[in-house]
Structures are given as structure tokens and as C-alpha cells.
Image: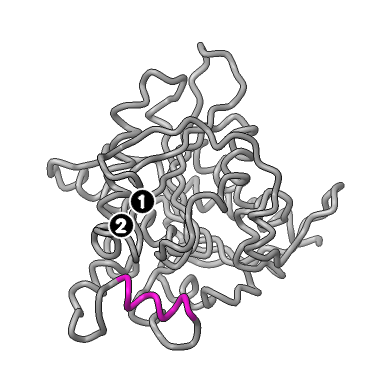
Amino acid sequence: MSQFTPILLLACCLFITGCANRNSQTLAESPAPEMLLSQVSYSSLLNLPAAAAGIKLAYGDNPLQFGHLYLPQISAQQPVPLLVFIHGGCWLNAYDIAHSNAFSQAVATTGIAVWSLEYRRVGDTGGGWPGSYDDVLAGIAHAQTSLSAYPIDLTQVVLAGHSAGGQLALLAAGHSYHHQAANKQPLLAPVKGVIGLAAITDLLSYQSDESSCQRATRQFLGGNYPQLADGYQQASPQQQPMHPLTMLLQGSDDSIVPLTQATNSGMPFQLLDNAGHFDWIHPQTEAYKHFLFTLQELLAQ
């Protein structure tokens, strides 16, 4: 436990220096006054108490092209930062936005607005690659151009995504930054940075028959490697230019996304001991607390 404070200070330094140092850190559990959970299940997310699912707003014509906007309980005169969140679920339409509702509500109580995106997935007409990614880009662009009526500071936008949603968020953040830097006409305005929560970063090494989620990779891409080598490369954050303020958060006990998706990514990452795959989006876990710390440090840049 004595290692916790210097490790978090090191994490702060990584963001302050633009994450230029790509060395990893391992985060030990911190003492906390409340009982924090670890290695929670997917079903536990669905069982969390949830109020209304935010303000539902469409960003496209398809019924699945919508987002839920969660606003903190603050004065309308005080603009707040915005987290754009992309849920996971192996890119499959069996897993929708509902399992992340409690996470989005919890983040909003900290004073940060949340724009949680639904999108077409494998099994939906137009879902898969690149349709799912196109939806995410459209949903982010909608937030940057159409949420000005709400008390949101659109210069303070951070992207985050969990699991398969992390893959989409990482690509979108890189697209935002590098299109702007190259003086191209960007689809997105620049965002401050991106956080990948148990993110899938390399689709070629991830796809296998070891689990249903890994098998879904081939469904998402629409075929096998090497027949679709270009698609695997374009869809893999490891193979694409990333945003300079990128951070991967990975649990040591994740049974769905291997540690190598973070450790071999070439991106800054932090490992949390005893954290499972779904801990990052469960508001009663140590992992969620670490996510909030990382988000607040990124917004402070």
C-alpha cells in the first residue's frame, strides 16, 4: 500500500508531459473507507440501480444511432466538461448501451457531463467494420456541433471506451488529433485525450477461437486474416496514429482482454492488481475510482 501514492504521482507526471514517457506502471490497491468490489460480473452491471437513462438524442436516422446525455445537477450558467463514452460488448448487438447506464450516471454526479453512444453492431444492418466506427465518429461529431444548447464546455471533451468500445474510442481520438495536425478537413474537432478501459488494441492478435468475444473479431471485420489484412490494420489502434494523450487502463485479472493488448500496444498503460474486465465500469470498484482519477487528471491538462 505504501507504493500507491508515488505511483499515482507518476501517473500525473505522464499526463503533464503529454504521456511522452511510455513506460508502464502497476497500480496497487489503495486504502478506502468504503468497501470496494473487484472482479465483478457482467450481470452485476445490469443489476445496478439505475434511474432514467439520461436525455435520449438521435445523431443519425437509424434507430440505433442515438446517445444518452447525462448532465450534472449544477447551475445552467456553469459549463462542465464532457466525457464521450463508447460501451463494449464484443461489437455484438446482443450487448447494448443498457449495461453502462449506471456508470454514466455515476460519472455525471462528479460534475462531468456524459454523452454515452449507442451504435450499430454485428448483427445489425450496417454494423461491423467500418459501420460501427462510422457511427461512433458521427456520434462524437454530433456532440461537438449540436450540444451547445446544454451547459457543456465543448473545449473540454475526453473520449473513453470499454473493451470493444475502447478500440473504437482510441481510433476516433487518433483520427481527431492527426487529421487536425495534418491540416486536413477533419470530421471531428480535436479532443483533449482518450482513455481505453480494457481496450482491444490489436485485432489480429486478439482474434482466435479461445473465447466467444475473440471469435466475434472475425464477425466484426467480416472475414479472416490475411484475406482482409487491410481491414485488420485499419481497425487496430496499435497500427494507427494515436492521440498524444492516450492512456490504457487494464486489470491484472481480466479474463476477456489479455494483458498483452495493453503491454504490447506501444501506448502508455497502467495495470491495476486484482481488477477484472467489468470492474472499470462498475461504480463500486477500485478500478472505477482509478478511472475517475485518470479522467480528472486528463481534463486538468
At a point 61% along the width and 62% down the height, the residue shown is 278
* Mark-to-mark CA distance, 2 and 1: 6 Å
Q: Position of residue 135 (x, y in %)?
A: 29, 49
At a point 30% along the width and 35% down the height, the residue shown is 142
Q: Position of residue 90 (x, y in %)?
A: 44, 68
Q: Position of residue 38 (x, y in %)?
A: 74, 63
* Amino acid at circle 2: Ser
Camera-nearest residue between 281 and 238:
281
At a point 34% along the width and 50% down the height, the residue shown is 173
- Give the magenta range: 212-220
Camera-nearest residue between 38 and 155:
38
Q: Is residue 10 left or right of residue 5?
A: left
Residue, disc 1: 119
295 w.r.t. 276: above or below: above
Element under disc 1: loop
Residue, disc 2: 132
Q: Is residue 155 left or right of residue 48?
A: left
Element under disc 2: helix
154 w.r.t. 102: above or below: above
Asked if marks 2 and 1 touch (Cβ < 8 Å), the reply is yes
